[in-house]
Amino acid sequence: MEVIPAMTDAPRVSKRALSAVVASAVAPSGELHRSIDWKGAFWVASGVPALVLFSIGSIAATVGSPSWLVWSVSIVFGFFQSFVYAEIAGLFPNKAGGASVYGAMAWLRYSKFVAPVSVWCNWMAWSTVLAIGSGLAAGYILTALFPADAAIHTKQITLLDLGFLTEGLALRLNAQFVIAAALLLLCFAVQHHGILQAARVQTVVGLAVLIPLLIVGIVPFLTGDVVRQNFEPFAPLNGAWNAQGWTLFAGGLFLAAWSTYGFETAVCYTREFKNPEKDTFKAIFYSGLLCLVMFILVPLAFQGALGVERLTSEDIVAGTGVAAAMASMISSGPGAAVGNVLVVMLVLALLLSIMTSMAGTARTLYQGSVDGWLPKYLGHVNRHGAPTRAMWTNLTFNFILLMMSDYVFVLAASSVCYIIFNFLNLNAGWLHRVDSPDTPRPWRAPTVLLAIGVFLSFVNALLMGWGANVWGDGALITGLVAAALILPVFLFRHYVQDKGVFPSSLYEGLGVSEGGHLAKRAGILPYLVLIGGAFIVFLGHLLARMAG
């Protein structure tokens, strides 16, 4: 008979070694690690408020004095929508990738071709943060180091003219591309060691960024620099609330959604939560509260202190003058020292946004691969639990986007993808309720909030058709083509790599085995929703054309 040694004879095990054993038991080799709680996800998502800096000048230059209202309305929309995402995320505690993955599971029952559109569009929309954010950060650095008339700002090599998409668009190489690429590689290095390491870094960077951003949002109100005249006249840039004026306002709401709705990325890490039942709702709810404050306060302070004329100046629209403008808002004069500190803060803010996007989009690609929507090679993770092949795919895609000469057009086209994802996933809330009524829900949204989510899905579809081309005549069609690219990708994975059979992991959380029957209790309603959404987009496009 085998003799089991007494406990007193056992060697002492350090807490660090014990933690490693537990982690390996929880997360087998080749899978994401359960290593963070909701606070970690909150800090990973804390880069979202900095997205206001991406387009605050562009929206003001397009909408005019009501631009502050655009941001306020948009973040309120996003906050209401987040409750739908919080519920559906709780249905799949063992899946990563965020709301798009959980929404795809609802649409799978009705069309295997619609479901992957959710995953793809979310990735396409969020991934562009890497290119746009690093490009802006590189612009800040170049502006701080070199005078405005230096050749380094203008010298470039044009690789390809893309004027057929929108006027002036081209692929080019310049100093901004080189610096931006280096910043992306720096963020990659941080993310390479897994979500726990990334969350620790982003906690420090987040505090260094959010506190100054909050100061900029509060100080002008305390000093009396926010004046009523800067909000008057309350009319769009064309001067009247006519068809053209409302089209400009719709365009502002359309573009702002790309930033304000972004905190839904907090549920990308469900598979990496230590306690997903409790952490999922807390992560998205508290991230939403942070964004609610920031996206209302900061645009109000900017416009109230600077005025529409300064806010729409070329340097702020381009992003290079944001630091000087912020310095003037919190000190009696711009001041070189204050300006330099704010340049550093802005670069950190953009790096924080990049890390937020890099973490979320990589997990979307990873889970899309595990579930059979995207190519198999994306399903690899390193020994730290980081989906490195997905991260490299992100980098490669964004190196191409970095070469584009018009970041606002890139943002608008990616916003089309984001609205498509949003539409599918807001309707996934009620679909899951109908088709999986008995599945345990760690957090259950009040039915009225699900209904508001459905209503907002059609509002967003209207804004897409109505406002996308405000940012370039080809923005809507470019975004739709980008969304359609998932079809050949999915066909290759499903019919070439998987021979028409989904991986068994896809069905986890649906209560059926591989190839099992999926109940479809909603009848024709999902198809009517899709037809209705397409009609609303077309209606919005007609409104834009009528406005001229």
Image (spheres, grey):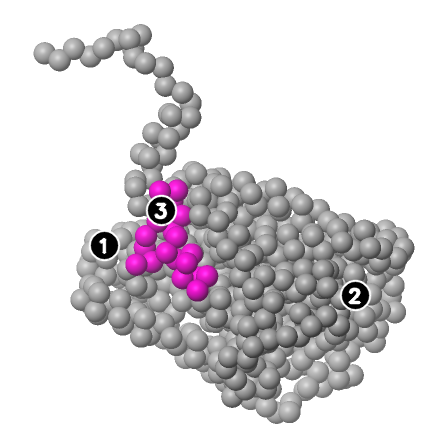
3 or 2: tag closer to the N-terminus: 2
Q: Residue at coordinates 23% horizontally, 10% vertically from top-left?
A: 5
Quadrant occupied by the C terminus:
bottom right
Above or below, 283 against 19 in this view is below
Asked if residue 146 shows in the view, the reply is yes
1 or 3: tag closer to the N-terminus: 3
Amino acid on which the number 2 mark rests in the picture: Gln
- SS state under label 1: helix
Q: Residue beneath label 1, please?
A: 504
Whether residues under marks 1 and 2 lie with C-beta atoms below 8 angstroms apart, the answer is: no
Which-is-in-front pick, marks 3 and 2? Answer: 3
Q: Nearer the viewer, residue 488 or 274?
A: 488
Q: Please give left or right for residue 325 compared with residue 540 in the image.
A: right
Q: Residue at coordinates 71% horizontally, 86% vertically from top-left?
A: 242
Q: Please give left or right for residue 493 compared with residue 388 in the image.
A: left
Q: Nearer the viewer, residue 42 or 196?
A: 196
Q: Residue beneath label 3, please?
A: 382
Amino acid on which the number 3 mark rests in the picture: Asn
Q: Residue beneath label 2, please?
A: 303
Q: Give the range drawn in magenta.
A: 377-396
1 or 2: tag closer to the N-terminus: 2
Measured in 3D between alpha carbons, the distance from the residue under mark 3 to the one under mark 2, in whole angstroms, is 46 Å
